[in-house]
Image (cartoon, rainbow, N blue to C red):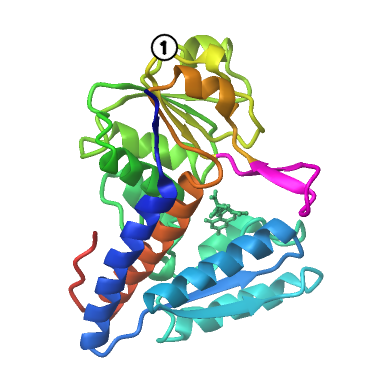
Amino acid sequence: MTEIIDGKAVASDIRSEITGCVDSLEDAGVTPGLATVLMSDDAASETYVSMKQRDCEEVGINGIHVEIDPEAPAEELFETIDQLNDDPEVHGILVQLPVPDHVDKREVIRAIDPAKDVDGFHPENVGRLVAGDARFKPCTPHGVQKLLEYYEIETEGADAVVVGRSDIVGKPLANLLIQKAPQGNATTTICHSRTDDLAAKTGDADIVVAAAGVPQFIDGSMLKEGATVIDVGVNRVDADNDKGYKLVGDVDYESAEDVAGAITPVPGGVGPMTRAMLLYNTVKAAGEQEGVDVELP
Ligand SMILES: Nc1nc(=O)c2c([nH]1)NC[C@@H]1CN(c3ccc(C(=O)N[C@@H](CCC(=O)O)C(=O)O)cc3)C=[N+]21
């Protein structure tokens, strides 16, 4: 029987534990604050940011949302970031990506105070993660590790293949999977668009993580019997329904489900975990900035 990895349920569990962390911060006189900044008209980005704000409300984090006209000069975004860096009520800052073409993404990431960088994208935080001393694990890789933990999927000595080399998922996740730490110690291969014979690599893997942003490109024929399949893709594809689209992953679920030992669905797999780990990082940031011990889940 294929085990369906229920990210929605695990995320809900983690949110209730985070509510406890928020309570202990409140007892110390601290309300954790998360600022989300959106400089985009993209419908999917708007949806994700509003979900993040709703999550904050649920657990008692003070959510602050700033919207910047995507046509505005880049300076407007940088001024906003400076203000949020200086605002003692803001413990975490998330600038929703992508930003418009006239805004330099790297510069944006560097402008955020590393202590408030709850995405974990700032070079200082990337460096710490690679050095095995992570401050903020990036939310999606961290969420994937939590799923592996909850479902007791052995990573030690396992062959893991990460398909996708992005700075926000592929690279940090591969780094975490090779670390001498829980949910680490995997023999990890990173595959990407120039990989020769991808199916041979995925077909040998005990754990396959699909994070390339290409709809349904990994199917059952590319998997080993019993493999764990983690689908990070959230692709909107046209559909004949009210919304006009549906969400599909990077994995062709129907064929993969027959072969996999365990698999994450889309929606309801990694996506909700990404949002839960953002709350986790925000509570961690607040505790560190305010000198309050927080017992994180
Ligand atoms: N600075 C920054 N940080 C991010 O973490 C970040 C970002 N920019 N830009 C875009 C990506 C994408 N991302 C998602 C998070 C949750 C879901 C999610 O909750 N998905 C739900 C369903 C969503 C829906 O219904 O549309 C699910 O898969 O079940 C999806 C996508 C975070 N990102």
Q: Position of residue 60 (x, y in %)?
A: 38, 79
Which residue is pictured at 46% across the width and 59% down the height? 275
Q: Image check: 219 left or right of 189?
A: right
The stretch drawn in magenta includes residue 239: yes
**Where 222 falls versus 80 (above or below)?**
above
Position of residue 179 relative to residue 277, above or below, is above
Give 48 or 172, whichever is nearer the viewer. Answer: 48
Q: Give the extent of the magenta segment.
A: 233-247
Number of dots carrying numbers: 1
Q: Amino acid at mark 1?
A: Asp
Note whether residue 139 is visible.
no
The structure residue drawn at horizontal position 81% and vertical position 70%, both measured from the top left corner, is 71
- Residue 199 on the magenta segment: no
Secondary structure beneath label 1: loop
* Residue of label 1: 204
Crowd rating for badge 1 (residues with CA inside 10 Å; few <14, some 14–19, many 20+):
some
Where 89 falls versus 215 (above or below)? below
Quadrant location of the N terminus? top left
- Location of residue 260 (image quadrant): top left
Depth check: 173 or 235 in front? 235
Quarter of the rendered image showing ligand 1: bottom right
Query: What x and y, as percent, mark residue 101?
Result: 76, 56
Answer with left or right where residue 28 lies relative to residue 285: left
Quadrant in the picture for the C terminus: bottom left
Give residue 27's quadrant in the image.
bottom left
Q: Is residue 135 visible?
A: yes
Residue at 46% of width from left, 12% of height from top? 203
Pick the front one: 28 or 190: 28
Considering every residue shown, the one lying at the far bottom of the view is 29
Residue drawn at the location 47% of the way across and 45% of the way down: 270
Coordinates of residue 25 in the picture (x, y in percent) = 25, 81
